């Protein structure tokens, strides 16, 4: 009876320990061992910063910079600082299509800050160093087998000394140890994984299922940007309930924020990824070739909350020569056909237009019904922002912006999107994809029929 009782007690012990070891899953968008990828528009280039997952601390942290347009050995200075003890390490990585990773040493898990510097700009990216934590089940498995082995040896020695009673007790303990280990092996896959070392504390339930929407304040530096001259577009994010800076953005499709800037007529288009320069502050350098009103749409997501689309506008003013010619404040004489212009150079990573004209099926989509957009790429595509391709759609007045993805395999030469236009009317659209050496932007327009006009 004693061995049976020991087995029952072992089973009960296993159940209690596993229930104690079970804890909520890791925080939103956090996974030990996974790479962190953050797109940045810095030094006039579209780059993606890759922080490789690490398996041990103290240990190496590898950081690489992937370029999505031609750059000639663009050096990016790196600085990693622990937010807990302030310990700082520095290094340098060269941005390229096939990057070489810089190796920096970190001493602890938990919150860190990565500072990037290139071309006179800097970005400050908070992140966490995470290391997988051994589970309670592993302790039971190895501990059970270890105890069983020790007791088995002890039982053999006791039996050899002609003490059958104690020998049976020791053997029963060994059996219990093996039982605990075996049961832990069986039930371990059913136990929720605990948070990794370095993860943020669990968030208590949020009212309404998430944090409140952020409010944006959009400004330009200088306050009156001039056509043809570089300026900074600044977005300050404010928590809707507290009024304090909202500084809890999470990586959303490999970026803290996706910013689409277009002129009213759609002749100017930029899809950029602004730099976090301070708590709740995002900035990106731009240059517009013509004066007029410009629209800015920002896609972002807060930790433990949903996505959000922000919309704002700003004005670009004419130069002295343009004002003398009488065209200050004119958005340009383009036909509004969505043609992308790279006049003025800089800013977006949109370093080339090209590719076949997209084919829309049906040719005149009906509002509220799925339509397909297909385009033949001008070469094998590679993933950019985690996807093979992007379709961005804007209505004529800028009140609506849509963004969907091509989910195909890297290397494909035909991209296919599915999109439902919300209402009848004329839409500006852009397909984007990355080749080995550049990002291609293909602009086009779509006329959409209202449902009552469909046959």
Image (spheres, rainbow, N blue to C red):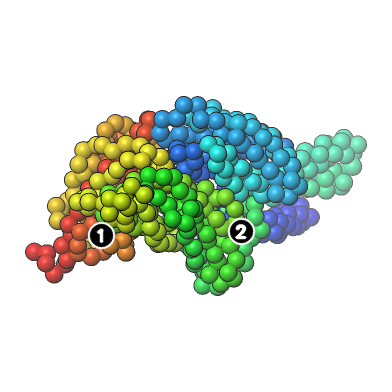
Q: Kindly identify the residue that appears in the image at 19 percent across and 62 percent down.
A: 425
Q: Disc 1 on helix, strand or loop? A: loop
Residue 87 in sight here: yes
In the rendered image, residue 390, in percent from the top left (x then y), is placed at 34, 46
Q: In this view, does 233 lie above or below 207?
A: above
Camera-nearest residue between 453 and 71 = 71
> What separation in Å lies between label 1 and label 2 (alpha carbons)?
46 Å
> Mark 1 or mark 2: which is in front?
1
Q: Position of residue 221 (x, y in %)?
A: 49, 53
Residue 226: x and y in percent read: 40, 50
Pick whichever, 175 or 181, lies toward us: 181
- Tell me where residue 420 sits by quadrant: bottom left
**Which element carries disc 2, helix, strand or loop?**
loop
Q: Residue furthest left?
A: 455
**Residue found 61% across the figure and 49% down from its top:** 126
**On the rendered image, what quadrant is the C terminus found in?**
bottom left
Residue 391: tell me if it is visible. Answer: no
Q: Mark 1 points at which residue?
A: 396
- Tell me the quarter of the picture where residue 421 sits: bottom left
Q: Which residue is drawn at 23% across and 57% down?
A: 427
Q: In this view, does 198 lie to the left or right of 342?
A: right
Quadrant location of the N terminus in the rendered image: bottom right
Left or right for 20, reference 404? right
From the image, tell me which residue sits under label 2.
24
Residue in the foreground of this view, choosing between 455 and 316: 316
Image check: 160 left or right of 172? right
First in sequence: mark 1 vs mark 2: 2
* Pointer 2 local density, CA inside 10 Å: few below 14, some 14–19, many at least 20: few
- Above or below — where is 420 with respect to 56? below
Determine which of the numbered discs, if any, sits on residue 107 in the image: none
């Amino acid at each position: 009876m004693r061995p049976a009782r020991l087995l029952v007690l072992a089973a009960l012990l296993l159940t209690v320990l596993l229930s104690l070891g079970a804890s909520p899953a890791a925080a939103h968008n956090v996974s030990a061992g996974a790479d962190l990828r953050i797109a940045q528009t810095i030094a006039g280039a579209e780059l993606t910063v890759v922080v490789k997952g690490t398996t041990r601390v103290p240990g190496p942290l590898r950081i690489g910079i992937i370029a999505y347009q031609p750059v000639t050995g663009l050096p990016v200075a790196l600085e990693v600082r622990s937010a807990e003890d302030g310990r700082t390490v520095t290094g340098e990585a060269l941005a390229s299509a096939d990057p070489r990773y810089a190796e920096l040493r970190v001493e602890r898990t938990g919150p860190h800050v990565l500072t990037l510097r290139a071309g006179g700009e800097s970005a400050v990216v908070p992140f966490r160093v995470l290391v997988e934590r051994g589970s309670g089940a592993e302790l039971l498995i190895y501990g059970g087998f270890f105890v069983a082995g020790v007791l088995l040896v002890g039982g053999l020695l006791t039996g050899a000394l002609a003490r059958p009673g104690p020998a049976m007790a020791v053997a029963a303990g060994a059996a219990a140890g093996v039982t605990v280990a075996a049961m832990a092996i069986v039930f371990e896959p059913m136990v929720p994984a605990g948070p990794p070392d370095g993860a943020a504390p669990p968030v208590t339930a949020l009212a309404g299922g998430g944090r409140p929407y952020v409010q944006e304040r959009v400004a330009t530096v200088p306050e009156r940007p001039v056509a043809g001259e570089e300026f900074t577009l600044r977005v300050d994010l404010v928590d809707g309930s507290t009024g304090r800076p909202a500084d809890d953005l999470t990586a959303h499709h490999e970026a803290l924020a996706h910013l689409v800037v277009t002129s009213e007529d759609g002749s100017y288009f930029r899809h950029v990824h602004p730099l976090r320069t301070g708590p709740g502050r995002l900035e990106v350098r731009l240059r517009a070739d013509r004066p007029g009103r410009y629209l800015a749409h920002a896609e972002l997501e807060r930790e433990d909350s949903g996505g959000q689309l922000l919309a704002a506008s700003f004005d670009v003013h004419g130069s002295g020569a343009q004002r003398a010619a009488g065209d200050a404040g004119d958005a340009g004489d383009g036909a509004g056909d969505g043609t992308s212009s790279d006049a003025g150079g800089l800013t977006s990573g949109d370093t080339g237009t090209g590719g076949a004209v997209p084919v829309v099926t049906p040719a005149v989509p009906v509002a509220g019904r799925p339509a397909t957009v297909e385009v033949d790429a001008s070469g094998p595509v590679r993933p950019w922002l985690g996807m093979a391709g992007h379709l961005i759609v804007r209505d004529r007045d800028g009140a609506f912006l849509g963004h969907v993805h091509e989910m195909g395999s890297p290397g494909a030469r035909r991209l296919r999107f599915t999109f439902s236009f919300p209402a009848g009317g004329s839409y500006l659209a852009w397909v984007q994809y990355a080749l080995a050496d550049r990002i291609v932007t293909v602009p086009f327009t779509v006329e959409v029929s209202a449902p009552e006009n469909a046959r």
